[in-house]
Amino acid sequence: MINNNKNKKGSIIIIGAGPSGSIAGALLQNQGFDVIILERQLFPRFSIGESLLPQCMEVINRAGMMDAVVNAGFQYKNGASFVCRDRQTEFSFEDKFTPGIGTTFQVQRGRFDKLLADEAVGMGVKILWQKEVIAADFSTDRPKLTVCNRSGDAMTYSADFVLDASGFGRILPKLLDLESPSDFPVRQALFGHVEDRINDSHFDRNKIRITVHPEYKDVWYWLIPFSHGRSSVGVVAEPAFFQGWNNNDQALQDIIKQDLSLSGLLQNAVFDEKVNAITGYSANVKSLHGKGYALLGNAGEFLDPVFSSGVTIAMKSAALAAELLVRQFNNEAVDWQQDYAVPLQRGINTFRVFVDAWYDGRFQDVIFHPRQQPEVKAMISSILAGYAWDENNPYVKNSRPRLNTLVELCR
């Protein structure tokens, strides 16, 4: 049970200690709230979503965690490289339209997530590990969560407000019947960490590399270099593409061999970890908030991994929700739909436009066009850097018509 005291603004329970949970916890704790995070697992643990965007750094800085992240030895990242057969193009996040931080990191999420959680604890946030939320009651003024520990013992926690940062666990959407089908087709990803042994002087470890399959424009690979000679490598396609393989480890290696440029880079790679698979990861909900709760990051909506938007959306949602809770507990009028769901969705919808255009090939026509206008490229670079909420950017403010016009010009 969280108990209010005279020096605290209010009590908050956060479900999940991943990036959005730890960031929200730190932001709220620093504003005088009493915060407990309930986490089902122990950290470090494996998670996907390793290539951060510069927009993340703005939120990390606001949460007071910048020094810890900068000094952790993660792989520096300054942009993205796109490859399709003999065509290649690069986007530098420092050459972007939107003001703000232009570099970030590529991280093993196990270590990164634990770092953020440890920083939150250092600020006074309480994290209760191996506590699984199995029921939720929002019928009273103080929400109640029933929690089960590793021994199977159940206990009840209550607070003034609950934030669901459970990611793909999607705890409250499942318990409160908030799940809604995604508009995206079902896709599957195979991925793993390798000792990459890349020996190519032209390869830039400071950028994520996105490779389009040489035959299928809707199939793509990622290569995310880490520090210390390791990389995350994966392939995304609709499930039918993977038929014919019974072994994920063999499937990933065989599919990499289908692209000469990527297989050339990884010709000496050692696949020394189990290959993971995830299917049907895109998700949506009926509402991002309700009486006494709000959903953060992937607990609300997850689009697609192609532009590494997941952690950015998660951190943005954490910052927005924390700001609203400060206002709400200062007795200011707060409309969670207009002040949280609508602005958060604006950025998500910007990413959605570009994800749609990636899979149907239109955005690929744009980025691989031989004559790119620097000012337009800078605007697109801002979105790829995560600044999808900057409505001074015409490709944010009017994403779909602007992109459609650009596609026609390129074609």
Image (tube, helix red, strand yellow):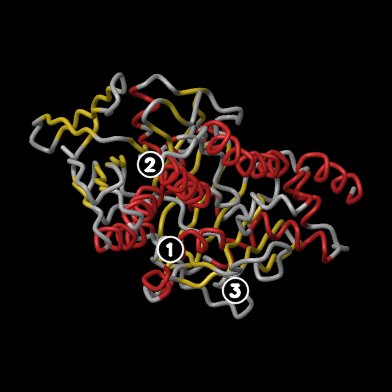
Residue located 73% across and 38% down the image: 360
Q: Residues within 10 Å of mark 2 (few under 14, many from 20)?
A: some
Depth check, mark 1 against mark 2: the one in front is 2
Q: Earlier in the sequence, mark 1 or mark 2?
A: 1
> In the image, what residue type sits under mark 1?
Val
Instruction: Name the residue at 28% across, 40% down.
Output: 13
Quadrant assignment, res 403: top right
Which residue lies under the disc numbered 2?
A: 329
| Between 119 and 359, the one nearer to me in the picture | 119
Above or below for 225 versus 169: below
The crowding category of the residue bearing disc 1, from other C-alpha atoms within 10 Å (few below 14, some 14 to 19, many at least 20), is many
Q: Residue furthest bottom?
A: 201
Mark 3, other Cα within 10 Å: few <14 / some 14–19 / many ≥20: some
Q: Position of residue 133 (x, y in %)?
A: 24, 32
Q: Which residue is mark 3?
A: 204
Q: Earlier in the sequence, mark 3 or mark 1?
A: 1
Three-letter residue code for mark 2: Phe
Is residue 216 visible in this depiction of the protein? no
Tell which tag, 3 or 1, sits nearer the viewer.
Answer: 1
Name the secondary structure under disc 1: loop
Image location (x, y in percent) of residue 8: 26, 49
Q: Which mark is residue 107?
A: 1
Secondary structure type for disc 3: loop
Q: Is residue 160 above or below residue 261?
A: above
| Disc 1/disc 2 C-alpha distance (Å) | 35 Å
